[in-house]
Image (cartoon, rainbow, N blue to C red):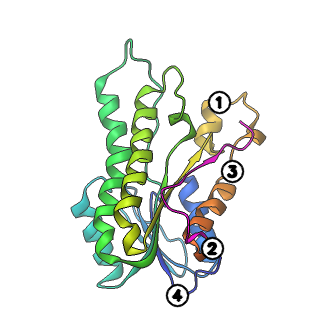
């Protein structure tokens, strides 16, 4: 997985999975563009960070990409930006459904729409879905619905772009081993979860030439959960 002379954009690149993915891509030679709602941070040579970007708004993403790329090409897009909330329907709020739709699904749609003018034949798009969207548990309705939307969007966009030679796939992790998840579930066996590094390896494969025949795939990454 050599990404020399390739430019790859990562939304949500300042989070735990985002930083692991950006680091892995940079280590393999990619120039990385990070788009995140958080303030910009210095991540090192070859990494351009544009902070304060609402990636659920295509105009904001388009402006951020123009700032980072000019009229340059983009060889890959990884949509990591998202959110989570556990909430039962009884006593819950419809606002939670709207919030997770915006963070998880609208952000992926808007970012893809803004990136399309920069993508060329052979480019790759990787979205982050969730294994919990395949079979939702109690309190997971809003989250699972938004991530199920990511799955169907991935399939539809793959069909739309296949004759242009652009692949679109999604990874479906179980629980990712992040500081936030450890804080929420302190008694869990963290060794069974999916590490950000392991998930970034799967993302890297889908971005690589080795995955040129794979599109519209929803790939489970369950760890040992």
Residue extent of the magenta highlight: 211-225
Per the image, label 3 sits on a secondary structure element best described as: loop
Disc on res. 210? 2
Residue beneath disc 4 = 5
The quadrant where residue 67 appears? bottom left
Residue beneath disc 3 = 195
222 in magenta: yes
Per the image, label 1 sits on a secondary structure element best described as: loop
The residue drawn where x is 29% and y is 57% is 110
Per the image, label 2 sits on a secondary structure element best described as: helix
Q: Considering only order in the chain, which callout, 1 or 4, is on the residue closer to the N terminus? A: 4
Q: Considering only order in the chain, which callout, 1 or 2, is on the residue closer to the N terminus? A: 1
Q: Considering only order in the chain, which callout, 4 or 3, is on the residue closer to the N terminus? A: 4
Q: Is residue 98 left or right of residue 154?
A: left
The quadrant where residue 77 appears? bottom left
Residue beneath disc 1 = 185
Where residue 114 appears, as percent x and y from the top left, is 28, 66
Where residue 217 appears, as percent x and y from the top left, is 53, 54
Where residue 72 appears, as percent x and y from the top left, is 35, 85
Answer above or below: position of 116 versus 225.
below
Q: Nearer the viewer, mark 3 or mark 4?
A: 4
């Amino acid at each position: 997985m050599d990404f020399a002379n390739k430019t790859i954009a990562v939304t949500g690149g300042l989070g735990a999975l985002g930083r692991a993915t950006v680091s892995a891509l940079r280590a393999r030679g990619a120039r990385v563009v990070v788009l995140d709602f958080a303030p910009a941070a210095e991540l090192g040579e070859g990494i351009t960070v544009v902070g304060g970007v609402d990636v659920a708004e295509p105009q904001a993403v388009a402006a951020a990409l123009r700032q980072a790329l000019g009229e340059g090409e983009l060889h890959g897009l990884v949509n990591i930006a998202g959110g989570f909330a556990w909430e039962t329907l009884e006593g819950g709020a419809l606002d939670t459904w709207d919030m997770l739709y915006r963070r998880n699904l609208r952000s992926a749609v808007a970012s893809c729409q803004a990136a399309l003018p920069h993508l060329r034949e052979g480019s790759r798009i990787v979205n982050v879905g969730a294994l919990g969207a395949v079979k939702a548990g109690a309190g997971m309705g809003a989250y699972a619905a938004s991530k199920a939307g990511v799955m169907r969007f991935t399939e539809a966009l793959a069909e739309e772009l296949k004759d242009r030679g652009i692949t679109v796939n999604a990874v479906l992790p179980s629980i990712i081993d992040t500081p936030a998840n450890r804080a929420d579930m302190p008694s869990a066996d963290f060794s069974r979860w999916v590490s950000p590094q392991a998930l970034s390896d799967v993302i890297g494969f889908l971005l690589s030439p080795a995955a040129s025949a794979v599109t519209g795939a929803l790939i489970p990454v369950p760890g040992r959960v």
